[in-house]
Image: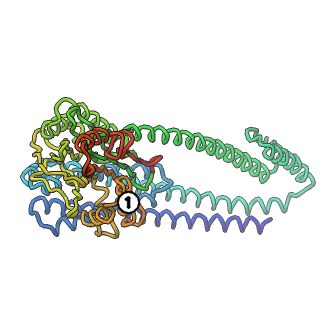
Amino acid sequence: MLGLLIVAAIVGTVVTARDYRTGAQEALVRQAAANQLLVNLLNAQTAQRAYILLGRGDDLQDYLAARDRYPRGIGRLGSVVSGEPDLERAADSVDRSAQRWFAEAVAQIQLVRQKRRNVAVARVNRGVGDERFQVFRNEHARLLQEVEEKRLHGLAAADRNRSLTLISIVGAAALALLMVVIASRALWIRVGGPVGSLADGVRRVARGRLSEPVPAGDSAVRELAELVVGFNIMQSDVLQERDAVAAAARREATQKTERHLWETVQAGLLPQRLPGVPGFRVAARYQPAERALLISGDFYDAVALTDGRLALMVGDMAGHGAPAAAQAAGLRFGWRTLVAVNPNPAAVMAALNVQMSIPGHRTEGLFASLLYVLVEPRGGVSFAPAGHPPPLLLTASGCRALEPRATGPLLGVVDEADWPVSHAALPPGGTLVLFTDGLIEARRGASDTFGVERACEVLEAERRSALETRVERLIDAARRHDDEHLRDDVVVVAVERPVQALPTPGSPNGRGRLARGARRAPSGADGGPDGGSRATRPSSLP
C-alpha cells in the first residue's frame, strides 16, 4: 500500500511538472503564430500603400505574396488555439478584421488598375484602410492578452495541483503509518459496504442508468470514500459526454437541413432555363469551387427581348455567404426589370450602380463586377463591362478577347460614373463567350494562371463540338489546370450564331423555303425551345 501511495505521489509530481512545461510551450507557440500573422499583415499594408502611392509593380507583387501567405498564417493560428473557446473567438475576430482590411486593399488596388489612382489615393488619405488595420491591431492585441491570461491561468492551476500533490504525499504517508498501527477487523467491515455500493453502481452504469450516484456511507474508509466520489464524478462525466454526443447529432441534423436550404437558395439565384432566340444558340454552366459549403456570389441571366434582341449578363459579387447571395439575387432581378424597360447598356449599368451604392454595402465590402451584352438579330454586339473581364469571340479566323474601348468601375464602388458601351459583330458561325474571373484565374502553383490564351486554345480546339460541350470542356480544362480543384466559382455563358443553311439549287421556291426554315429555327438547331438554349448547373453546392 505504501509503495502504491509513493507511486501516486511521483505520478502527481510528474503531471504537475508536465503542466508547467506544456502551458509555457503552448503560450510561446500561440504568441509566435499571432505575431507572425501581424508581421504578414504589416508587410501587406506597407506594400499595398506603396503600390497605391507610387505605382511600383514590385510593391504589388510583395502585397500579393503577403496576401497569399495570410491563409496559412490564420490556419496555423486556428490550429494552435483549437479547443480553447475564448482563444478561438479572439482568433475569429482577428480574421474578420483582417478580411475587412483586405477588402479595402483590393478595392484600392482595383481603382489603380482602372487608372483611377487619384481616387485610390483619396481613399488612402481618408484613412478607411488605416481604421480597418487599427481594428485588426486591436483584435490582435486582445488575442495576445487572452493567450497571456490563459497561460497565467494554467500556471495557477499547476500551482494548485502542486500544492495538492504535496498535501497528498504528506497525508498518504501519515495515513499509511496510521493504517499499519491501527489495522483491525473493523477495517474490513468498513470496506465491505462501500465495495458493495460500488458494485451496484457499476451494474447500474452497465444498464445505462447514469443519473443515480453511489452513496458514500459514514462507515466507509477514506480511500473507498474517495473512490466512491471519483466513481460519481466519472459517472457524471459519462452522462455529460452522452448528452454532448446527442447534442452534436442534433446539430449535425440541423446543419444538413441548413445545407439543403442554402442549396435551394443558390439554385434560385440562377435561371432555370435560358431563352430560345431565333438564329442563336445559348448555353450556360455554373461550376462552384470544390471547397466547404459557401453560397456563391457568381450569377448570370439571359433574356429574349420582344424586338428579337438577346440580352445576357454575368456577374461576380465580392464575397460568399448569405449577404453576397442576397445582393447577387437583387442585381439579377434588378437587371431583368431594367432590361425589360430600357435595354440600353449604359442606362442599365448606371441604374444597377444606384442599386448597389448603399453606404452599408461599402462598409461591409460588398461590390460587384458585371458584364452586360446585347446581341442584335443580325449579329451586332453591344457590351458594357463594370470591372469585369471582357467576352471572348470565336470566329473562323481564331479566338480573341473583345477589348472594350473603356471599362466602367465596379458596381457599388462610387456613387456616379459612366459605363462606356463598346460595339462588335458576331458573324455567322461565330461564338461569344462570357465568363467570371474564376475561369481565367484558375492557378497552377503560385502564379501560373489558366488565362485568356489557354481559354481560346480550348475553344478553337473544340470549335466543331456542340455549344454545351464546348462550355463544359472549357471549365474542365480550367479545373485540370488547377490540379482538379477549382479555388473559385466559375460561370460561363456562350451564345453561338449558326451559319444558315443555303436553299437547294434549282428549287423554284428555294427562297421561300429558306425564309420558312429561318422561322422554324426556334424549334430546331438555332436555339429554340427544343434546340440548344440550355443552362447547366451542378446538382448541389460544394
Residue 268 place in picture, x, y as percent: 39, 37
Residue 540 place in picture, x, y as percent: 47, 46
Tell me which colouring the rendered structure shows.
rainbow
Residue 158 visible, this orientation: yes
The answer to whether residue 228 is left or right of residue 14 is right
Residue 250 place in picture, x, y as percent: 59, 40
Residue 305 place in picture, x, y as percent: 23, 34
Q: Measuring 81% from the left and 48% from the top, which residue is drawn there?
A: 202
**Residue at the far right in the pictured view:** 185
Give above or below for 517 relative to 399.
Answer: above
The answer to whether residue 330 is left or right of residue 264 is left
The answer to whether residue 479 is left or right of residue 53 is right
Mark 1 crowd level (few <14, some 14–19, many ≥20, 10 Å Cα):
some
Image quarter in which the N terminus is found: bottom right
Q: Measuring 21% from the left and 47% from the top, which residue is drawn there?
A: 371
Q: Measuring 39% from the left and 45% from the top, which residue is drawn there?
A: 295
Q: Look at mark 1 in the image and give the residue it sits on.
A: 473
Give above or below for 67 relative to 121.
Answer: below
| Number of callouts | 1
Which quarter of the figure has residue 335? Answer: top left
Pick the front one: 221 or 7: 7
Mark 1: amino acid: Arg
**Residue at the far left in the pictured view:** 118
Check disc 1 and report its element: helix, strand or loop.
Answer: helix
Pick the front one: 207 or 189: 207
Q: Measuring 59% from the left and 58% from the top, which residue is drawn there?
A: 161
Residue 101 visible, this orientation: no
